[in-house]
Image (cartoon, rainbow, N blue to C red):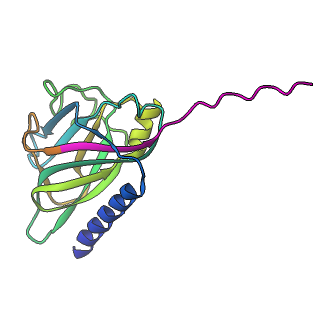
Amino acid sequence: MRHRVLLGLTITALLLTHARALEAAPVALAPSDLAVIRDPEVPDDARVLVRFEVPSEVRGARVDLAVLELQADIAAPDSVPGIFLDAFPLTTEWGSGTVDWREGWETPGGDMDGTVHASWIAEVGEQAMLRFDLTDMLQGWSSGARENHGLTVRVAAGEVGALCADAGRGADVAGARLSVWHTPTTAVAPAAPDEP
C-alpha cells in the first residue's frame, strides 16, 4: 500500500515540474457546471460530474498541459492509505439541475468514452486533493475532435473505497479548477509562387 502513496507523490511532482517548465502562465478555468450523482443501490458509488467551457484563446491551440484540481472526501478501510480514481470524458449532455444516476443516460452513472482517461491516486481523508492530467481530453475538446460534455470522476474499477460526495450540487467538492497551458497556433501565409 505504501507504493501507492509514493506513486501519487511522484505523479504530483511530475505534473508540477512540467507546469513550471512551461513559460506562459496558465489559463485558469472555473467549472461551468458541477454535480454529484450516487447509485441508489450502491451508496458508496458516487461520481463527480464537471464541465469547463473551452475559452476562445484555447480553441484550436496546442494544449501543452491541462490539470484538473479539486478536493473531495475519500474513504477506505483502515488498512488502505489511498485509492485509484479515474476521470473519463462524458459523451452525453447533462445539467446539474436535472442529472441523476439513471435519467438521461444510456448507461446508469453516465455515458463515458473509455478510450481516453486520466488517473489519480487519492489519499484517504477529508478534502483530499485530487489532480488529473487532462491534456489529451482538453486537446480533443479544443480541436473539435470530441464534443465537450465535461467529465466524470469516479473510483477506479476494482478499488475498495469511496468518493464521499453528497448527491446533488456537489457542495462538498471544493476548489474545482482547470489550469491550461497552451501554445496558440498561428496561421502561416502560403509562400508566393516563384515567378518564371
Q: Residue 153: give x, y in percent of width and height.
A: 24, 45
Image quadrant assignment for residue 41 = top left
Q: Residue 113: give x, y in percent of width and height.
A: 37, 39
Question: Taken as a whole, is the magenta stretch helix, strand or loop?
Answer: loop
Q: Residue 125: give x, y in percent of width and height.
A: 9, 60
Residue 116 seen by the camera: no
* Quarter of the image where the C terminus is located: top right
Q: Is residue 179 magenta?
A: yes
Q: Does the magenta stretch include residue 140?
A: no
- Classify residue 106 as left or right of residue 114: left
User: What segment is highlighted magenta in the picture?
Assistant: 176-196
Image quadrant assignment for residue 168 = top left
Toward the viewer: 43 or 121? Answer: 121
Toward the viewer: 4 or 31? Answer: 31
Q: Residue 43: give x, y in percent of width and height.
A: 8, 46
Extreme residue toward the bottom, this view: 2
Count of all numbered marks drawn on residues in the image = 0
Toward the viewer: 47 or 127? Answer: 127
* Quarter of the image where the N terminus is located: bottom left
Tell me which residue sits at (28%, 57%) in the image. Answer: 120
Tell me which residue sits at (13%, 54%) in the image. Answer: 162
Tell me which residue sits at (25%, 29%) in the image. Answer: 105
